[in-house]
Amino acid sequence: IDLKRARQLSLIVKEIFPEFVYYAKNLRFFHLNFWSSQIVPPELFDHLTCLRTLHLEGQSTLELPNEMVKLIHLRYLKLSCISLKDLLETI
């Protein structure tokens, strides 16, 4: 899948996070729904630096990595989960 020019992406992750998302460097909107894994991969925020809107959804406790502070263009963050392990002070 070629996502180099994609601006919006909605993804349901059932088991393993797909690495092709790392190549979508121009994403502005990203909706990520976790079914089994509750940990957001820290490497994701190294690649998606243009992100403006992030919607993370999970069926259980969600854990956010410290690398999320690299999203300097982020304007809208929606966390839809049962509970949140920790919320970063910068957020």
Image (cartoon, helix red, strand yellow):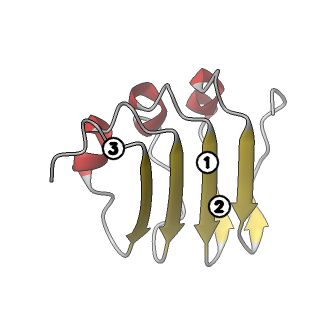
Q: Specify which label sits upstream in the sequence, 1 or 2.
A: 1
Relative horizontal placement of residue 31, taking residue 27 as reference (left or right): right
Find residue 6 and name its label.
3
Q: Specify which label sits upstream in the sequence, 2 or 3.
A: 3
Which quadrant would the N terminus be assigned to in this image? bottom left
Q: Measuring 60% from the left and 71% from the top, which residue is drawn there?
A: 58
Q: Within 10 angstroms of label 3, few (less than 14), some, or many (20 or more) residues?
A: some
**What residue did someone put label 2 on?**
62
Front: mark 1 or 3: 3
**What residue did someone put label 1 on?**
54
Relative horizontal placement of residue 40, taking residue 88 as reference (left or right): left
Which quadrant would the C terminus be assigned to in this image? top right
The residue type indicated by label 1 comes to: Leu
Q: Measuring 39% from the left and 69% from the top, which residue is drawn there?
A: 13
Q: Within 10 angstroms of label 2, few (less than 14), some, or many (20 or more) residues?
A: many
Q: From mark 1 to mark 2, how far is it between C-alphas?
A: 14 Å
